[in-house]
Amino acid sequence: MEQAQRVAIVTGAARGLGAGYAQALAQAGYAVTVTDLRDCAATRESIAAAGGRVLALHTDVTRAADTRAMAEATVAEFGRIDVLVNNAGAFSNLTNSRFEKIREEEWDLAFAVNVKGPWQCAKAVVPHMRAAGGGSIVNISSMASVFGRPFFLHYGASKGAVIGLTRALARELGRDNIRVNAIAPVMTDTPGMRETVGEHFAELAEATLKNQCLRKTLEVSDQVGTVLYLAGDMSRFVTGQTLMVDGGTVFL
């Protein structure tokens, strides 16, 4: 009997890391739902042009109605959900500043998107994963949550909460054969990063390299292997873990 094609959802997939994750999963044989507040047309077209099955949706991960619709549309299109990559995040729309100058609305935005979002998405997809006999949730945290990046407290704190969410969900969902892990990347060369730091990109990249064992600025292609590992059967006995993709900056 032929095995059904596995299905992945990638949030925040319009560009950058999310687009890279979605394209890699499609190349690995997954049918992929790509979602974002931005238009996912470019990601959808790149996957379709390579022969992949892809569904593009507009989703606000902070809204339960949106995440339920995302899960239901995916099952209607592809029949199941095996993988969720919680990549959507507030980052480029947050301001670097001293902690006492962070505006309350920015603090709330960071936690709404970066913490509430993965929770809402997990609630939406887990019933379908149970129906499929299991699955894998990959949450995208950040090296900033462990290293303690200054002047970006709302971001680092929210990404630290993602690690706590990952560990608790792994405990709760193990009985359902659903694995939950996180990835914590170092500064990555993406459009969002360049928008956030602007003309200071080269300066920040150089400062970041000084803390790394591997002296190379992280690119999207450096991360996709970790997502594929956590999504697939090669990590079938790995759950509750946070993998640092940071060139050897933090050792856990």
Image: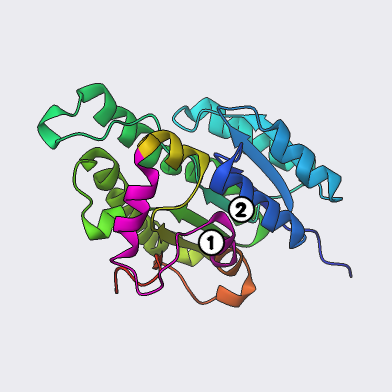
Residue 44 is at least partly visible in this image: yes
Residue drawn at the location 70% of the way across and 40% of the way down:
43
Residue 82: in magenta span:
no
In this rendering, the answer to whether 55 lies above or below 22 is: above
Q: Element type at marker 2?
A: helix
Quadrant of image for the C terminus: bottom left
Magenta stretch? 200-227
Which residue is more in the foreground, 43 or 109?
A: 43
At label 2, the amino acid type is Tyr
Q: Element type at marker 1?
A: loop
Question: Mark 2: few, some, or many residues within 10 Å (few <14, many ≥20)?
Answer: many
At label 1, the amino acid type is Gln
Q: Quadrant of residue 166?
A: bottom left
Q: In which quarter of the image is residue 133?
A: bottom right
Mark 2 — residue?
21
Q: Where is residue 153 in the image (x, y as percent from the top left)?
A: 21, 42
**Which mark is first along the chain, 1 or 2?**
2
Residue furthest to the left = 100
Instruction: Using the image, tell me which numbered label, if any, was put on residue 223.
Output: 1
Which residue is more in the foreground, 7 or 178?
A: 7
Q: Distance between the residues labelled 2 and 1?
A: 8 Å
Residue drawn at the location 53% of the way across and 61% of the way down:
223
Position of 83 with respect to 64 (left or right) is right
Q: Is the magenta stretch mostly helix, strand or loop?
A: helix
